Image (cartoon, rainbow, N blue to C red):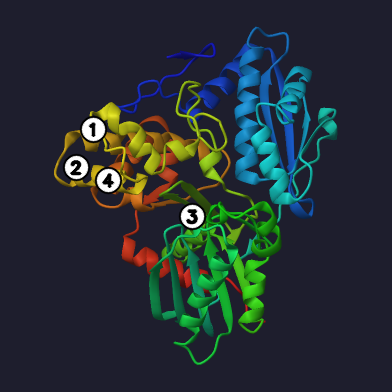
Amino acid sequence: MIFKGLEIEPSLIPILDKEFVAASLFNRAFRDAVLKSGKSAQLRIAIERGDGLVSTYETPVFDESSPMNEASLFYAERLIKTLLWIKGGWKITIGGPKSICEYIKSIYTVGGLREFDARFMGRVYEKEFTVEIVDIDKVPGSNEKSKPLGRHLKGCRIGFDAGGSDRKVAAVIDGNPVYSEEVIWHPKTESNPDYHYSEILKAMKTAASHMPRVDAIGVSSAGIYINNRVMVASLFVKVSDDDFDKKVKDIYLNIQKEMGNVPLEVANDGDVTALAGAMELNDNNVLGIAMGTSEAGGYVDSNGNITGWLNELAFVPVDYNQNSAVDEWSGDYGCGVKYFSQDAVIKLSPVAGINLDESLTPAEKLKTVQEFLKNGDERAKRIFESIGCYLGYAIAHYADFYDIKHVLILGRVTSGDGGNIILETAKKVLSVDFPELAEKINLHLPDESSRRVGQAVAAASLPEIK
């Protein structure tokens, strides 16, 4: 396959998506071509997030005099989008070829190609998003700081997991769950934040009633949290901006007061998943990927710490085919949400020859396909094989930004036989096209029951009792 003037040679192609252009393969082919061309330049990118923390990345690109300069623009745009959603930040400082720097500055503006990303990051960090062009030697170096989170098991603790369709809570004494419950709730369709507050508080008080006291509370939830404040979260998607600022941003801090001001820690559910895996495996460098309504990610580094990065893998491009599926929220193509969620199953079903009833919810469509698979339907099998192929190439892409020893895959898309098919196909991709990664990275598919218990204990272990 020739793409953007480069030859891309995948050993395996998703059986239901022959036009798939793996980000991992394109990036490697691009960098190799740059180095062989004799017409290279350096591009340096620094992304600043909260508290002055900075992630810096340097890469070779084609010199502006090269006829491949257009490929450099494409590569830089996809790379910076990836860095932004993995690392998070409100300011890009960039140095290198003038055409690339000016192009990046132009697209992260009002009306620009990446206006959504700029507005989103501005909201997360409560600063106006900016792109600053400087001489390459003036681009700041990295200033990373990870922090330990969790693994505190002593005492009487509450672990709360705020899911999109059910809320889970556990009472945990010295690391052992003594009570747990799952309750159906509807946070994504409720516009009154008092509903969310009362449901969360009810869960906390229920768990508290099963222990002699409450020493600490840990919360695992989809979304972005900074200093235990809700910055962006799909659970509150129907809440107005005004009510969000007044009642949602500090919802967990207000719950903390109601529960006696005990230590409280809120973390993204992806990070808590990775933490639970690290605790179960008794190892570090764990990347968690949850495939459900969307794609969630979390990471525990070599020190067993979380990095403070966003890890919003749903928005990270994994397919560079510009005619690929578009994410309705961000308006961008090829992003993880359309490859590692129930949307992926729904997207591939008609290609496989399975026409799903449009009156079904996305979750019901997923269950229908999983039933076909359970009954030995080859069409359904091809869907999960294609997702596994996507995953193998995506893991190789993620490995450019994370130091990975273990990948946990979980979520409702991996339930039943589909999870094993995804896992085995991803392993095959790594072994054939990325043998050095296949040797280093172990893929795991935890069973659902142990995952739920592990997630509750990991959430409960988040706060430190001082």
Give the foreground label among 3 and 2: 3
Q: Which residue is mark 4?
A: 418
> Pointers 3 and 2 in contact (CB under 8 A)?
no
Q: In the visual, does 453 lie left or right of 33?
A: left
Residue, far front: 192
Estimate the spatial distance between the alpha carbons at disc 2 and disc 1, rounded to whole Å.
9 Å
Estimate the spatial distance between the alpha carbons at disc 3 and disc 4, rounded to whole Å.
29 Å
> Pointers 3 and 1 in contact (CB under 8 A)?
no
Q: Which residue is mark 3?
A: 189
Amino acid type, residue under disc 3 in the picture: Thr
Question: Where is the N terminus found, in terms of image quarters?
Answer: top left
Estimate the spatial distance between the alpha carbons at disc 4 and disc 1, rounded to whole Å.
16 Å
Q: Which residue is mark 1?
A: 354
Give the foreground label among 4 and 1: 1
Decide which of tag 2 and tag 4 comes sooner along the chain: 2
Decide which of tag 2 and tag 1 comes sooner along the chain: 1
The crowding category of the residue bearing disc 2, from other C-alpha atoms within 10 Å (few below 14, some 14 to 19, many at least 20), is some
- Along the line of sight, which residue is nearer the eye, 290 or 241? 241
> Pointers 4 and 1 in contact (CB under 8 A)?
no
The crowding category of the residue bearing disc 1, from other C-alpha atoms within 10 Å (few below 14, some 14 to 19, many at least 20), is some
Q: Secondary structure at mark 3?
A: helix
Q: Which residue is mark 2?
A: 372
